[in-house]
Amino acid sequence: MNKINIAIDGPAAAGKSTIAKLVAAELHMVYVDTGAMYRAITLAHLEQPDTSFETLVNAIDLKIINDNGQKIFLNGVDVSERIRENDITLNVSYVASQKAVREKLVGIQQEMTAAKGVVMDGRDIGTHVIPDAELKIYMIASVTERAERRLLDNQQRGIEANFDDLVKDIERRDHIDMTREISPLMKAHDAIEIDTTGMTIEAVKDKIIQLARKINV
Ligand code: C5P
């Protein structure tokens, strides 16, 4: 489906990336996880805490390779796994609230979607990055279910985690993301909300694919 873009937004750990990746593969579209881009800038910031965000984003070399999944390189180093660790998750929403960071990344994201054929997930994709996306999904799920999913995901990645801390982190990040000044997380007026609580990955994927096929007839 190379004539449309699909925007998938929603709060932390709602399953956006998992679903976006599957939808993109089935529809032969390119999958872009924008959260990974904010996470990579967060890593750069933790490595150079005294550098201003403006200098930081203008100096770094960020490469995203989208080929059946996504790999992200910061200054030539593959940081795709490193950016999932707890120090990054703890700091990413603060870094993502910085104007210089958002301007830089939104610019890159808009270039990536200009030719269409992209499934992009994040927080401000339908509202800000591609407001003209042909299909916009706002994906939600209960905090308990999101924490359970993240716990499983972290265990599979070998990242230390416990359920109560994950609930707190998800609530804290959602609060920062929803109340920040620049393009806060919100449902676009024309987005379709999907509550994935109790739904299987397969069912959510199929629902989005059906919606996409209806548009791209
Ligand atoms: O999607 P993920 O949880 O990896 O995103 C990490 C963080 O990056 C979010 O909590 C949010 O603060 C930020 N983010 C954002 N805008 C996006 C994608 C992610 O502010 N489009």
Image (cartoon, grey):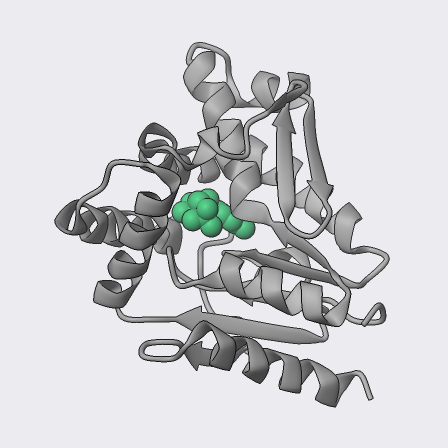
- Foreground pick, 132 / 206: 206
Q: Position of residue 211 (x, y in %)?
A: 64, 85
Q: Quadrant of residue 104?
A: top right
Q: Is residue 52 above or below residue 114?
A: above
Task: Name the foreground residue: 78 vs 194.
Answer: 78
Identify the residue shown where x is 73% and y is 67%.
5
162 displayed left or right of 149? left
Q: Residue drawn at (37%, 55%), measured in percent from left and top?
A: 12
**Nearest to the observer: residue 177 or residue 198:** 198
Q: Classify the position of the N terminus by image quarter.
A: bottom right
Question: Where does the image place residue 13, in percent across and percent down from the top left?
Answer: 37, 57
Farthest-out residue, left: 164
Specify whether residue 190 is in view: no
Residue at 53% over, 29% down: 41
* Point 85% across, 71% down: residue: 3
In the depicted structure, whether residue 135 falls above or below residue 29: below
User: Left or right of 34: which side holds 134?
Assistant: right
Q: Position of residue 146 (x, y in %)?
A: 30, 62
